[in-house]
């Protein structure tokens, strides 16, 4: 059973509000979940728009629940997870440019 920490959408049309939940990876976005560990209001102005039970969040992370990209960003903003340094992208060498075909003048 693979566990994910992800967001479920609540709120009215045009006024989103999210719960941060622990759910099985196969369940639908707004479907069955195991535990609610926090809330997130994207229209909120400051950090108070994010609330978490840090003990629950760290407990689920320790049990092996993996956050989605969006949930990870919210957890970092809330101070539950430490921000990871961005990985350096390895550049692949560009292929050599082909010489331009010059039209022959008659």
Image (spheres, helix red, strand yellow):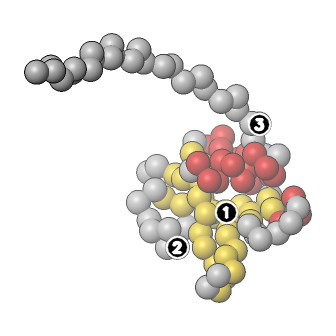
The percent position of residue 64, horizontal first and vertical second, equals 57, 42
Give the mark nearer the N terminus: 3 vs 1: 1
The percent position of residue 60, horizontal first and vertical second, equals 65, 49
The percent position of residue 102, horizontal first and vertical second, equals 22, 20
Task: Judge whether residue 60 can be spotted in this image.
Answer: no
Crowd tier of the residue under label 1, counting other residues whose Cα lies within 10 Å: few below 14, some 14–19, many 20 or above:
many
Residue at coordinates 33% horizontally, 13% vertically from top-left?
96
Quarter holding residue 17: bottom right
Question: For this view, does 61 lie left or right of residue 3?
Answer: right
Closer to the camera, 63 or 51?
A: 51
Q: Are marks 1 and 2 in contact (CB under 8 Å)?
A: no
Report the residue marked by disc 3.
Answer: 82
Which numbered marker is on residue 96? none
Asked which secondary structure carries label 3, the reply is loop
Q: Report, in whole angstroms, how far the alpha carbon at label 3 lies from the one at label 1.
A: 18 Å
Report the residue marked by disc 2.
Answer: 30
Residue at coordinates 33% horizontally, 17% vertically from top-left?
97
Question: For this view, does 25 lie left or right of residue 43?
Answer: left
Crowd tier of the residue under label 3, counting other residues whose Cα lies within 10 Å: few below 14, some 14–19, many 20 or above:
few
Report the residue marked by disc 1.
Answer: 20
Quarter holding residue 63: top right
Closer to the camera, 84 or 58?
A: 84
Asked which secondary structure carries label 1, the reply is strand
Q: Are marks 3 and 2 in contact (CB under 8 Å)?
A: no
Q: Report, in whole angstroms, how far the alpha carbon at label 3 lies from the one at label 2.
A: 27 Å
Give the mark nearer the N terminus: 1 vs 2: 1
Question: For this view, does 66 lie left or right of residue 2?
Answer: right
61 to 71, vertically: above or below: above
Q: Single out the residue that lies furthest toward the front.
A: 106
């Amino acid at each position: 059973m693979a566990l994910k920490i992800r967001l479920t959408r609540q709120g009215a049309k045009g006024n989103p509000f999210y719960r941060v939940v622990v759910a099985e990876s196969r369940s639908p976005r707004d479907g069955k979940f195991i535990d609610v560990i926090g809330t997130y209001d994207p229209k909120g102005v400051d950090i108070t728009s994010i609330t978490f039970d840090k003990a629950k969040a760290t407990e689920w992370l320790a049990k092996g629940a993996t956050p989605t990209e969006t949930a990870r960003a919210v957890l970092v903003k809330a101070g539950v997870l430490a921000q990871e340094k961005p990985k350096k992208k390895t550049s692949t060498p560009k292929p050599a440019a082909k010489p331009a075909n010059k039209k022959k003048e008659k």
